[in-house]
Amino acid sequence: MESNEVVIETRNLYYAYEDEKYVLKNINLRINKGEIIAILGENGAGKTTLVKHFNGLLKPTKGEVFVLGKNVKDMSVAELSKHVGIVFQNPDHQLFSETVEKEIEFAMVNFGFEKHYIEERIEWALKLMGLEKYRNRSPYTLSIGERKRLTLATVLSYDPDILILDEPTAGQDFLQKEKIAELMNLLKHRKKTIIIVTHDIEFIVNRVERVILLVGGKIIYDGDKRGALTNYKLMKEARLLPPQVSQISWILYNLGVKLPKDILYTEELLRELLRIYKS
Amino acid sequence: MNTLIELEGVYFKYAGSKEYSLKNINFKADKGEYILITGPSGCGKSTLTRVLNGLIPNFYNGELKGKIKVVGLDVKKTPAYKMAKYVGTVFQDPENQLFLSTVEREIAFGLENLGFKREVIRERVREALEMFKLNELKNKAPYELSGGQQQKVAIASIIALRPKILILDEPTANLDPLSAEEVLQLIDKLVKSLGILAIVIEHRLEIALKYATRMIIMDKGKIIADGDPRKVIISKEANIVGIPKVVEIYKRLVSEKVSLNTIPLSPEELAKLFVKVIKKDGE
């Protein structure tokens, strides 16, 4: 395996806001280069708190976090954010410039990129996210979906190796979701590591390989997606619903129909249904 | 009065905009309906709800044409505070809607604003806390609550005003699946027990579809499909909003000559319909 390079590692990570109780408890994770991972859990489970440790926005209360082999306590946020780009759920926490173009430009100027390169990247990002016609508009005049795409454009423009997308599909319509999926594909081909924080189960079924389930600040599952998404008990514990395909097979199983309980994909379910129908 | 909304040939263009955001909208709705409105972003769904609750033309400037009757009132001639008595609106982000120190105060606020007497306010708040099972949370600050609980409080504070129409603009966009399910189910209960008209804008069809009594698809300012959810969801117009997996599986089964008789809107329905078919064929 060529891609066994660990890009993010946490060791016994605990985190508490001020003196409150721990919102992250003993998190041990190893994320390899090029992996596509979904971190799932209900609101308040600690998903966003966890990923904020990956670009230095938060520092562990106890334990350690390593990014690209270096302990984050020895790295500045500026250094980290060059490698780890986070697109937050609420775009308004992230946007502040006068125009769309300036918004994209900002980070690149800060990183000291050359002018002609910056111009090139702005054009690329605007086009990729379908925002060309808004280049001179104020970000605040855009719809929430468009603002979200702008935060994506901003982060993609400086080409970080690790991308963290926090609820990228929330409030997005079907076509925008398809675009986000396409984008993830593009990033995958470019060997980026992608971490998506979400509770949009249907969206991730065909788009990630590994799933991490967080409940009350603890990891209750880390592994192959099928093991999590088709397990009713785990999903319920995380206050999530299995994909509709898995729900159907589970209900059929409980109604006495003989089929596997861990069906995940449409094609698998159809094959089973047709087999049963014909027998 | 059963008909609560009557729109005929409605057009709207925002001030400064070249294009109409609503084009020739003809739309009638009765009490007891649970209407799901969906469509790509920018299709005009939020604009339509703004016409229904009077934010257009009271707060948004622009050119409004056509006949608009909501609860028998002409929206163009009725001040916003009067519309608020009949039409309650809940938005995507409850955080932006809740701002008081406790859940109880939050529910009382709208009533106070509309000038109800103190006894009435007390009674309505008590009722709302009960109905929405919020008694345990009544002294908590809204920001201490989960997203689902916050959205419940937002709906409770609207329902306390006893509106005839409840509009929800993407009420579950920021909620986890189980909370989203709870909120949409709660609306179903309100429609059935209070006989109100609910208009819900949603992208999450896999959860919302099964509760709707009627489904509308909008695109580019127009209503392009309107009717029974089971018919609308298999129309070609539905392709732009993305059909849920259950419906996709139904269609694939049909193409393999396995007919389930009805179009399922939830995994439970699909499973039960399938079991019926295999039992019948086995006999």
Image (tube, helix red, strand yellow):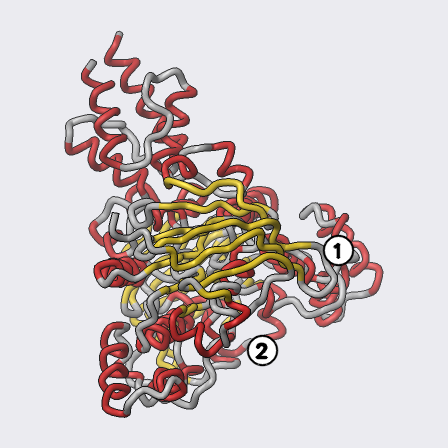
Closest to the observer, B2 or B233: B233
Question: Which residue is the site of mark 2?
Answer: B79
Q: Chain of mark 1?
A: B
Secondary element at tag 2: loop
Q: Position of residue A218 (x, y in %)?
A: 58, 46
- Residue located at (28% from left, 58% from top): A181
Q: Earlier in the sequence, mark 2 or mark 1?
A: 2
Q: Are marks 2 and 1 in contact (CB under 8 Å)?
A: no
Location of the C terminus of chain A by quadrant is: top left
Q: Position of residue A254 (x, y in %)?
A: 43, 20
Question: Which residue is the site of mark 1?
Answer: B124
Q: Chain of mark 2?
A: B
- Residue located at (84% from left, 59% from top): B119
In the rendered structure, which amino acid carries the disc numbered 1?
A: Arg
State left or right for residue B137 relative to residue B11: right
* In the image, residue A241 above or below residue B201: above
* Quadrant housing residue A81: bottom left
Are the residues flagged by discs 2 and 1 from a single subunit?
Answer: yes
* In the image, residue B14 above or below residue B218: below
Is residue A37 visible from the viewing direction of this image?
Answer: yes
Name the outermost residue toward the top.
B283
Q: How many marks?
A: 2
Closest to the observer, A30 or B240: A30
- Residue located at (44% from left, 59% from top): A167
User: Crowding at label 1, few (<14), some or many (≥20) Cα neighbours within 10 Å?
Assistant: many
Is residue B216 visible from the viewing direction of this image?
Answer: no
User: Crowding at label 2, few (<14), some or many (≥20) Cα neighbours within 10 Å?
Assistant: some
State left or right for residue A20 relative to residue B209: right
Secondary element at tag 1: helix
Name the outermost residue toward the right.
B119
